């Protein structure tokens, strides 16, 4: 590490729930210099007479005084302030020893240009020889920001006290904290004002309290805590500077943070100070990208980076960390880390991908591991607490091994772990400490499944719409954003905005089976009506990825003349549509991606949806409350529909074709229009920032993802009344709903699974359909065997196709109809009746075939 | 105890700023910037203005992504070391000579100088690998270092991205684009 950047002090003590505060320093010749008050029991401040132009002098000064008082009230710190009243002089200086608090309404002092984002500044003057703070001024950017009083704030204003408490922390010598979190627990010294609810930023969190307690502790404070020491080194044994270490008290939630090299810069040593007695999980993580040398004063560079997060002792998994117990006054030494997860030469094993919960009872479940320094590697697996089985894993690539676990009945909880040995017969387990990985074989109710991309969690959530239970979370790429089902419903495609690829998920097993690379920031997806081609807009690249679904091979096509996006997309067999948001245009392209024409539409066209018959294209526009209806066959705008909102994000046509749904993201509502006359049928307020729409296969339920309120709203597909919600997390975005798909059509899913209680012909998918529709039905357990007839009839009641005529046992069954009659001839567009008949039951469903 | 670990060799009076700042996404930076440039720092000089310390940085502009193209640009930012006094604003970027950056700049202030938007948020350092591939490293894209209630921060998506793809994204975002993703 560089000597001039040798070290900075980043020590934490704590009294509350989480700490990671930093102390303000500046670079000395050989070491950083800490900024502190030498007489913290008597820190003066003086207020400029007029206060904020947005508030009365009385109110703004009261709020600032209260902000000082909040820090003074910390019982473990001896900080106290002297209120020197008000002044009519406001010349900030370096050396006048007057700690002036004022609002720079004309930007005469701060000189920050408009748009800088700076709300307030605290300046500290320090004695060069002692580090003693001798002068401090807090300057509020009154020119560009409007300040609100008390616990109020109006749109476009910032709460004065939220900002003032933060700035007083700086005045005391505290830096910005690297800890983040929800507003309710985010430390006050987090640098960003993010428009949280008024008042949320003005209460001190444990991190803030720990900071001021460390700087100016009361006499007994230090004796109540312990410390942990150790080193952080790379695989070559070099000490690392700037690796972030976090001690997390697993019982109280207290967090304390430091970085390696805080004391000497190069050896990689660290000290975690001020730990309240208790059990701690120790984590090592790289500081990179967010908080770095620039954010903390510009005196640091070369923070160690590029190593994975890990836990003591050499565990990647949080729940597998070895806990460390600390007592008051105790020092634990030699708690060392080697970055890169492994001890040098020791067998190292890493799970390649954690299997998701699965409805697959037939198996096998393929478990993959990445391992180095191993001669032999085994997979141990077991059901619940049964004795485990051990099987040798087979190499399938460089450092990659696999092993199969046989299929299991539903409700089975499977656990597994790895064992490896190296040349020296050294043995390693992963997970360690007797822990196991696990997943479950879940039961489906037979009702449709809702697949939702959770953008912030990098997973697709699977919810059973009958039970409302989340069955699985399927790990995908970074920032999953939109998803679409294949025509047969067996594959789910997920665009991963930040990892620049498309995840392919088996809807029968809930496992990711492939990644298809795209260009930058793949966004919206569309499927050609024949189901053979998948299109993805690469919103950061100005291109389209065209995927041949027979091979999953993608080809990227450059879109001429596009200045932003593309964003929305819709596909017919003969043409593809995308939106050019910046130019307010719809682009009409050939299926291979050649732009044929441009059509001016309403401002900022975002999303597209075709009517079920593909004749009408609906265009949602973010820039104005207009729905553009485009005749997709004649390639002309047929209607512009004015909407009672300022813009819309998503659009979807109801499967029956009678209604169109739009999300008005800024209004928090969904608009429903009649397609017959394009009149507004209903506006439903669903949640914060609705962005995704989907329908149950029978069209009876409309699903709306509310991205910012982490909620999915369910609307009745007929009345459009709200009929329920699912709570999610992590910003739900794209959603797709399908009937369960079973591994093998025309066969029972699993004789061993729990059997259905009722006779049900489930909604088909897709419906309407073009090439093929999936059919699922269940036979109750109370009849051991019965004859089952599944037939298709046309609108005149004439028999068209026999799909099943067999004696079957209780269970779940699946079939499909390809739109052909018994002679193999394709039948025409129209409404058909699907009939399921047994000795004691008969149920029908309508099918709409569109050619 | 902690104090004992510090070797306090003190050279000069310190003059230090700290801030509360708005948080900007790359989309917001791109959309709000009056000028976005790829530039190399060619000069650095600390000065006093009305008793305050500022540093004048001179950049040669290698590429203009947004705004009026000029061969050179100057930034006049608070902070620096002068006459035994050190002054800085936490989060205000400092530039070393010959370093390359992508800068997202505000409009000019009343004395004719722009600042990086959101302090360090508007500064992306460019580093070149052994094969001369230029990659961008974000200075601050949000406090994703450690979440108290969630998983650890993922690797920031911008970190290490190749310069040309980064600029392509920025160009896309630089239009009057709403949050369309």
Image (spheres, coloured by chain):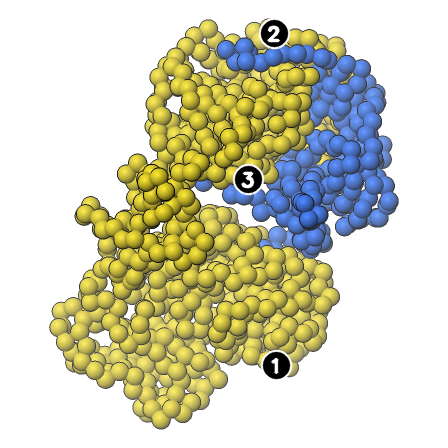
Give the labeled residue for mark 3.
Answer: A306
What residue sits 66% from the left and 17% below the top? A30
What residue sits 54% from the left and 29% below the top? A238
Residue A547, given in percent of the width and then of the height, sits at: 54, 69
C-alpha distance separating marks 2 and 1: 80 Å
- Chain painted blue: B
The image's mark for residue A474 is none
Horizontal side of A381 relative to A78 (left or right) equals left
Q: Element under label 2?
A: loop
Horizontal side of A178 relative to B130 (left or right) equals left
Q: Quadrant of residue A264?
A: top right
Give the labeled residue for mark 2.
Answer: A38
- Chain painted yellow: A
Horizontal side of A65 relative to B130 (left or right) equals left
The image's mark for residue A633 is 1
> Residue extending furthest bottom?
A823
Give whichever of A273, A492 is nearer the camera. A273
C-alpha distance separating marks 1 and 3: 53 Å
Q: Mark 2 or 1 closer to N-term?
A: 2
What residue sits 39% from the left and 87% below the top? A820
Depicted A99 relative to depicted A615: above or below: above
């Amino acid at each position: 590490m560089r000597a001039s950047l040798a070290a900075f002090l980043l020590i934490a003590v704590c009294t509350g729930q989480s700490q990671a505060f930093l102390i303000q320093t500046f670079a000395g010749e050989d070491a950083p210099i800490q900024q502190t008050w030498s007489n913290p029991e008597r820190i003066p401040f003086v207020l400029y007479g007029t206060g904020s132009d947005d508030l009365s002098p009385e109110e703004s000064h009261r709020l600032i005084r209260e902000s000082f008082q909040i820090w003074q009230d910390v019982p473990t710190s001896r900080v106290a302030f002297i209120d020197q009243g008000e002044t009519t002089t406001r010349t900030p200086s370096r050396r006048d020893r007057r700690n002036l608090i004022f609002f720079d309404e004309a930007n005469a002092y701060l000189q920050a240009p408009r748009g800088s984002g700076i709300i307030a500044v605290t300046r500290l003057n320090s004695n060069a020889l002692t580090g003693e703070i001798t002068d401090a001024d807090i300057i509020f950017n009154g020119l560009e920001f409007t300040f609100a009083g008390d616990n109020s704030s109006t749109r476009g204003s910032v709460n004065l006290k939220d900002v003032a408490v933060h700035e007083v922390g700086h005045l005391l010598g505290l830096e910005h904290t690297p800890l983040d979190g929800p507003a309710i627990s985010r430390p006050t010294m987090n640098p960003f004002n993010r428009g949280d609810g008024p008042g949320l930023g003005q209460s001190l969190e444990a991190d803030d309290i720990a900071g001021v307690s460390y700087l100016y502790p009361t006499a007994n404070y230090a004796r109540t805590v312990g410390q942990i020491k150790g080193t952080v080194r790379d695989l070559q044994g070099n000490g690392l500077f700037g690796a972030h270490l976090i001690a997390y008290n697993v019982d109280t939630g207290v967090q304390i943070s430091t970085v390696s090299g805080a004391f000497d810069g190069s050896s990689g040593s660290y000290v975690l100070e001020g730990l309240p007695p208790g059990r701690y999980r120790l984590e090592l993580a790289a500081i990179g990208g967010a908080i770095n040398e620039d954010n903390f004063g510009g005196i640091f560079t070369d923070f160690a980076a590029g190593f994975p997060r890990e836990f003591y002792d050499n565990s990647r998994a949080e729940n597998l960390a070895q806990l460390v117990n600390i007592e008051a006054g105790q020092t634990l030494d030699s708690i060392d880390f080697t970055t890169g997860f492994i001890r040098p030469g020791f067998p190292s094993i890493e799970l390649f991908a954690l299997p998701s919960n699965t409805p697959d009872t037939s198996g096998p479940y393929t478990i993959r591991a990445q391992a180095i320094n191993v001669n032999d590697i085994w997979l141990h697996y077991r059901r619940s607490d049964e004795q485990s089985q051990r099987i040798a894993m087979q190499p399938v690539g460089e450092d990659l091994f696999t092993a199969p676990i046989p299929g299991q009945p539903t409700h089975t909880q499977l656990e597994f772990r790895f064992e490896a040995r190296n040349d020296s017969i050294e043995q390693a387990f992963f997970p360690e400490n007797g822990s196991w990985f696990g997943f479950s074989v879940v039961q489906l109710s037979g009702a449709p499944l809702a697949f939702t991309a959770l953008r912030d969690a990098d997973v697709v959530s699977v919810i059973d719409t009958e039970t409302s239970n989340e069955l699985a979370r399927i790990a995908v790429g970074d920032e999953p954003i939109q998803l679409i089902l294949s025509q047969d419903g067996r594959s789910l495609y997920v665009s991963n905005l930040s990892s620049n690829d498309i995840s392919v998920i088996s809807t029968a097993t809930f496992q990711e089976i492939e990644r298809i690379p795209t260009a930058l920031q793949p966004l919206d997806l569309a499927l050609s009506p024949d189901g053979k081609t998948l299109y993805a807009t690469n919103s950061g690249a100005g291109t389209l990825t065209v995927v041949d679904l027979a091979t999953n091979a993608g080809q990227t096509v450059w879109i001429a003349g596009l200045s932003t996006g593309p964003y929305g997309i819709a596909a017919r067999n003969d043409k593809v549509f995308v939106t050019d948001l910046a130019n307010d245009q719809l682009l009409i392209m050939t299926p291979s991606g050649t732009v044929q024409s441009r059509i001016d539409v309403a401002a900022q066209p975002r999303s597209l949806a075709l009517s079920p018959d593909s004749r009408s294209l609906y265009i949602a526009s973010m820039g104005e409350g207009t729905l553009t209806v485009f005749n997709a066959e004649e390639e002309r705008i047929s209607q512009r529909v004015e909407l009672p909102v300022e813009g819309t994000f998503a659009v979807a046509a109801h499967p029956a074709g009678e209604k169109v749904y739009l999300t008005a993201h800024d209004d928090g509502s969904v608009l429903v229009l009649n397609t017959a006359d394009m009149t507004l049928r209903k506006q439903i307020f669903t949640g914060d920032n609705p962005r995704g729409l989907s329908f149950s296969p029978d069209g009876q339920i409309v699903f709306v993802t509310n991205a910012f309120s982490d909620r999915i709203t369910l609307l009745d597909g007929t009345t459009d009344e709200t009929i329920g919600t699912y709570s999610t997390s992590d910003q739900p975005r794209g959603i797709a709903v399908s009937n369960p798909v079973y591994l093998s059509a025309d066969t029972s899913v699993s004789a061993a699974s729990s059997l259905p209680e009722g006779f049900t012909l489930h909604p088909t998918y897709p419906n309407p359909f073009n090439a093929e529709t999936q059919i699922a039905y269940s036979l109750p357990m109370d009849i051991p065997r019965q004859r089952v007839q599944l037939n298709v009839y046309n609108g005149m009641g004439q028999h068209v196709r026999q799909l099943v005529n067999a004696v079957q046992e209780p269970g779940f069954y699946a079939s499909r109809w390809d739109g052909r009659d018994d002679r193999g001839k394709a039948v025409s567009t129209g409404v058909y009746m699907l009939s399921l008949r047994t000795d004691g039951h008969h149920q029908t469903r309508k099918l709409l075939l569109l050619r | 105890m902690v104090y004992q670990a510090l070797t306090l060799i003190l050279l000069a009076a310190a003059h230090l700023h700290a801030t509360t700042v708005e948080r900007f996404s790359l989309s917001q930076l791109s959309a709000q910037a009056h000028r976005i440039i790829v530039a190399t720092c060619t000069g650095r000089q600390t000065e006093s203005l009305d008793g305050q310390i500022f540093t004048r940085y001179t950049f040669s502009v290698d590429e203009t992504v947004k705004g009026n193209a000029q061969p050179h640009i100057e930034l006049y930012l608070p902070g620096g070391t002068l006459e035994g006094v050190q002054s800085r604003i936490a989060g205000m970027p400092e530039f070393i000579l010959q370093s390359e950056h992508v800068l997202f700049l505000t409009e000019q202030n009343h004395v004719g100088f722009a600042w990086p938007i959101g302090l360090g948020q508007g500064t992306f350092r460019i580093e070149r690998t052994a094969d001369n591939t230029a990659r961008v490293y974000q200075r601050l894209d949000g406090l994703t270092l450690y979440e108290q209630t969630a998983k650890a921060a993922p690797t920031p998506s911008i970190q290490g991205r190749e310069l040309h793809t980064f600029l392509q994204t920025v160009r896309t975002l630089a239009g009057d684009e709403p949050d369309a993703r």
